[in-house]
Image (cartoon, rainbow, N blue to C red):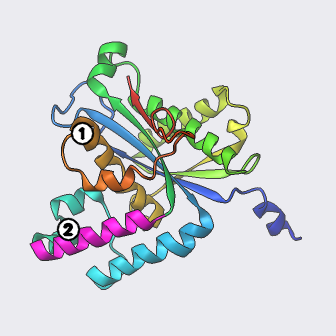
Amino acid sequence: MGAVGERSRQFSDYIVYVDESGDHGLRHINPEYPVFVLAFCLLHKQMYLEQVVPKLQELKFRYFGHDMVVFHEAEIRKSKGPFNILLNAEVRRSFLTDLSRVMEESPFTLVASCIDKRRFRDRHGDGENPYHVAMEFGLERVYMELQAQGQRKRLTHVVFEQRGREEDAALELEFRRILDRSRLEGLGESLDLVLANKLTNSAGLQLADMVARPIGRHLLAPEQANRAYETLSRKFRRDRGGNIDGWGLKVYP
């Protein structure tokens, strides 16, 4: 086996895409959305290539005629930019049904951290960063799931969207700190960070972008109808008894 083949054996069979909903600032908290959600989508690479990417591309060609459009939950929800086609009620209904089907059929495992920012600030003041707390929980649960999937001592890349030079530097520093201080043996050697440009037309990042806000909305108003969350609820990492609390979903504090 050549050098490339030897190196490829070091990589795990999985990749992780991460996105967020809400901001992590504590000084000015939006009363209508006082939460911060960080969602991790864990995908088997072969299934990602064979199922997720083609389905998302097909959806783009069907509604836009090309595959250069980048799916953003906020633009879809508000019918902004290329998604102004959704101002037509019939098109919107059809598109959301098809998008929901893609999400439902996409084989991924979901881990999410949700921070109640008001309670977090009451407990910690505004000196601690909710993003860092959410990231630590998510990375540790992702790592445990990877071990359960037989990926021990194999490197898995965790892809975050870039947010700006200072924010990216802070994210990378905290990512490394989490790996260094974790009590989970092997975590530091098993995960690596990838920062992707916001314009990157990555199916995985777009999948993750669809995930975070429905979780936040459900936690704020669990009694309200939430079609997207109903689909996502079946994706959460669970214990043997089927529980997601502390396994696939962490709400803090």
Residue 193 is tagged as none
In this rendering, the answer to whether 69 lies above or below 42 is below
64 vs 236, left or right, is left
Q: State the extent of the magenta-drawn residues as a range.
A: 89-106
In this rendering, the answer to whether 88 lies above or below 131 is below
118 vs 109, left or right, is left
In this rendering, the answer to whether 20 lies above or below 56 is above
Report the residue that reaches farthest toward the right: 1
Q: Nearer the viewer, residue 3 or 91?
A: 91
**Mark 1 or 2, closer to the camera:** 1
Judging by the rendered image, the residue that carries numbered circle 1 is 222
Q: Quadrant of the C terminus?
A: top left
Q: CA distance from mark 1 to mark 2?
A: 30 Å
- Residue type at tag 1: Pro
Q: Is 82 within the magenta?
A: no
Magenta span dominant secondary structure: helix
Under circle 1, the secondary element is loop
Crowding near the residue tagged with mark 1, few <14, some 14–19, many ≥20 C-alpha atoms within 10 Å: few
Judging by the rendered image, the residue that carries numbered circle 2 is 81
Under circle 2, the secondary element is helix
Q: Nearer the viewer, residue 163 or 150?
A: 150
Report the residue that reaches farthest toward the bottom: 65
- Residue type at tag 2: Gly
Determine the residue positioned at 32% across, 73% down.
Answer: 69
Can residue 202 be seen in the rendering of this structure? no
Q: Nearer the viewer, residue 103 or 162?
A: 103
Determine the residue positioned at 45% across, 52% down.
Answer: 235
Determine the residue positioned at 34% across, 77% down.
Answer: 60
